[in-house]
Amino acid sequence: MWTSIYRTLIWIAASLLSLSLVTCLIAGGIYWHFARHLPHPKPGIAVKLHEPLRIYTADHKLIGVYGKQKRIPIQYADIPKQVINAFVAAEDDRFFEHPGVDYQGIVRAAVHLLATGRKTQGGSTITMQLARDLYLSDKRTFTRKIKETILALRLNDTFSKQEIFQLYVNKIYLGKGAYGVAAAAQTYYHKPLAQLDIAEIAMIAGLPKAPSAFNPINNPSRAKTRRNYVLARMHDLGQISDKAYQQAKQAVITAQQPPTAKQNDRFKAPYIAAMVRKKMIARYGAQKAYTAGFDVVTTITSARQKAARKAIHNNLRAYAKRHAWNGASRSVSAQVAKTKAQRQQKLAELQPVAGTRPAIVTGLNGDTISVAIRNAKRIKLGPQDNPWLSSNHDASKMVDIGDIVYLHHTDSSAEANDTDWRLTEHPEVEGALVSLDPHNGAIQALVGGYDYDQSKFNRATQAHRQTGSSFKPFLYSAALANGFTAATIVNDAPIVYQDASLDESWRPQNYSGKYFGPTRLRTGLVHSRNLVSIRVLRRIGINPAVNHISQFGLGEKQLPHSLSLALGSASFSPLQMARGYAVFANNGFLISPHLIKTIKRGQGETVYRANPERACSDRIACPGQQQPSSSTRNLQYAPRAIPADNAYIVGDMMRDVIKNGTGRGALKLHREDLSGKTGTTNKQIDAWFGGFNANLVTVCWVGFDQLKSLGHYETGAHAALPIWTDFMGAALADASTTLPSRPDDIADVKINPDTGQRALHSNGINEIFRKQNVPTKAEAKRSGQRSPSEDVQSLF
C-alpha cells in the first residue's frame, strides 16, 4: 500500500515537474520569440513627448502655440502629491511595490476572462501603459499584452519608479488634444496643475481609461461617475479623509472650453506668429517644428508691439470716419433683434474684431441708435457717438433694426462704463507698420494689416507698393555721392519729356502744381519737389543712381531704369524700406532684419541664438579700433553701404522734413532727434511715412489692397504720418534724445540761401558739408556775390 502511494506521489511530482519544465520552456520560447524584436530601454533615453511649438515676445509673453498635441512637461518633484495618489488609486494601486507587472492584477484579469469570456480587465499597470504608449499600438490582443509585459519589466529594471511615473503623466493622452497632466489642467480648468482641487484632480485621473467617454466637457454625467470612482478609490486607500471625500463627491463640474475671445490670454501678434511658424517649418520641417517642443523667443517687445497694433487700428478707423459710412455688412431679422435670448445667441457667435465689439441695432429714434452688445447690455448712441450722422440727424438713413454694427470703447480699461462707446466700422483701407533696431536689424514691432482674422496677407513683408516721395532720400544720397551737396542749386521748373514708348508727352508736376525756380537740394527734399528730383536724377545718370541705391538692400531688379525712379515708381515692402532707412540711422551700414532671438528645445537646451551683423557705432567698436574683448570677439559686422558723412547729411535733411516740411505733423512729439519722409504716389493710391532716430527706425504704409485712390487729401502726411507719430510717441516715451553720431569730416558753413554758395556777409544760413566739399569765398565771388566791404565801396 505504502509502495503504491509512494509511486503515485513520485508520478505526480514528476508530472508537475515535467509540466513546470514544459511551461518554462513554452514561456521561455514565447519570451525569446517576442523579446528579441523588442527594444532595450537605456538610462537617459530621450523619450519623444511631441511638445508643440511655442512663440514668445522678447519679454516672454506667449504669442502662439502650434501643434496638435498640447503638452506642458513637468518634473516629478513638481507633481502635487494628490495627483500622484489619484493616478495610482485609479490605475495601479501597487505601482510602487510591483516590478512593473502586477501578477495579482493579471490573475484577477484571467479569472474574470474565464468567468465571463470577456477581456474587460486587462491588468495593465502604469508601467505597462507607458510601455504601450512608448513602443506599441492600442490594438487589444494577447500578443500586445505579452510585449507589454516584457517591456514593462525592462522599463522597471532601467528606470526608477519616479522616472516611470514622470514619463507616464507627461506622455499619456487625456482628451481635447491634451497630452500630460499639466496640459490637461490648462485645457479643462485653465489654471496650473498645482491649483487644482481634489475633485478636479480626480476628474483628470479618471481620463486615461477612456479620454473621450469620460471627457467632462463632452460627457459630464459619465465623467462625474468616473471621477467619483477615483475619489472612492482614494478614500479606500486612505489618501483623503471622509470629509474631503464627501465634499469632492458633491462638487459641481467646473471644466469648460477655453474662452476663444481671450485665446488663452495670449499676447496678440498674429502676423509675427505666422512669420515665425513659417521660418520654423523652413528650418526644421513641419513634423519636427510642431512636435519637438521648440520655444521661440522673438525680438519684438510687447509694449512696442501693442503700441503698433493700437496705432494701426485707431488711425485706419479714423480714416474710415473721414469718409462715407459704408453701411452694415450683415444683419438679423427684426424679431431676432428684439428677442433677448435670440439676440444674445447671435451675438455669442460674433467675435470681436481689432479691439471692437459687435452689437445689434434694436431701436432708432431720430438721431439716436439703440444697440445691444453681448451680456445683455443696452447702449444708446447719440450724435456725439456717431461720426457719420447726417446733417439732418436722421439715424434711420444709416442703419436699420437688426443691423450688426461695431462699437469702439474710448477707454479699454473702463468697459463697464456704458457711456463711452462710439460707433465705428471696419475700414476697407489697409495699413502696415514695421519698426526695427538700426544697429542689428532686430524687429521691434510689426503689424501686417488691420485684422489678421479677416486677412492673413502680411502687408509689412509681402506687399510691394510704389513708394512715392518716401524713396527720395535714397536718390539724394546718390546725389551726394556724385558731387552734389545739400546746398547745390537745382531748378524747379516745368519739364516736358518725349518718349516713343509713351502715347503722349510726360509732363511731371509738383504735388502743389506750383514751381519755385532755383532750389537748394535740402529744400527740394524738405518740400518734396518732384521736378527737383527729376533734374537731380538726370544730372547723376540713371545707371550711377541705380548702382548707388541698390547698396541700401533695395534690389536692382526692382528699380526702374527710367526717370520715373525719381518720383518713387519703384515698389518695395515696408520692411525693405525700413532696412533702407536704417542705413541713414546707423551711419551707413546695411543690417539684415531678423525676428528670432533664440530657439530652445525640451527642458531649455538652446539650439539657436541670433548673432546678427551689427553696425559699427558708438555702441559697438568697429574692427581695428581696439583689441576685441571677450564680449565683442564673436560679433559679426554689417557691411558698409554708404559713407558715414553721406548718411549723416541725408539724415539731417530728413530732420528738416519734420521741422519745416511735409513731416511737420511729427512736431507734436517734441523731439529734436527725429528724421523722416512722407510719400504719396500718383492719385493718392499709396501713402507712406518712414522715419527714425539713432536707435529706432519705423515705416508705415496705408492703401487699399485693390489699387484705388485713398482720396484727394489722403497724402502720406495725412494718412500714414499719424500712425507713425502715435507709435513713435509710445515707443520713445521713456527714451532720451538720441541723434546719429556726427562724423569728424562734417563742417558747418554759412551759405547764401539764394545761391548755395558760401555767405560773404552775416545774414547767411547754416548748412553742413563734407570738409572736402565746403564752398569757398572765391567760388562765391565768381558767382557774383559781393562781400560787405565791396557793397560799401559801391556806394561812392
Image: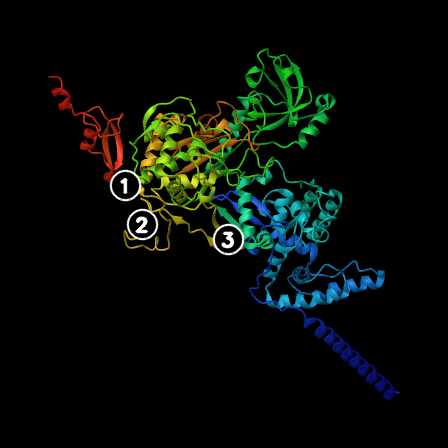
Q: Please, which residue is most extreme toward the top here?
A: 392
Residue 34: name its quadrant: bottom right
Q: Tag 2: residue type?
A: Cys
Pointer 1: what residue? 743
Q: CA distance from mark 2 to mark 3?
A: 31 Å
Q: Tag 3: residue type?
A: Lys
Q: In this rendering, is residue 57 above or below 779?
A: below
Q: Residue 401: x and y, percent?
A: 68, 19
State the mark number for residue 622. 2
Q: Residue 790: x and y, percent?
A: 14, 23
Secondary element at tag 2: loop
Mark 3 vs mark 1: give the one in front. 1
* Image quadrant containing the C terminus: top left
- Is 514 placed left or right of 453 in the picture? left
Q: Tag 1: residue type?
A: Pro
Secondary element at tag 3: strand
Mark 2 vs mark 1: give the one in front. 1
First in sequence: mark 2 or mark 3? 3
Q: CA distance from mark 3 to mark 1?
A: 41 Å
Residue 753: name its quadrant: top left
State the mark number for residue 600. 3
Q: CA distance from mark 2 to mark 1?
A: 14 Å
Chosen colour scheme: rainbow
Disc 2 packing (10 Å; few <14; some 14–19; many ≥20) = some
The residue under the point 74% across, 22% down is 335
Q: Residue 768: x and y, percent?
A: 27, 34
Secondary element at tag 1: loop
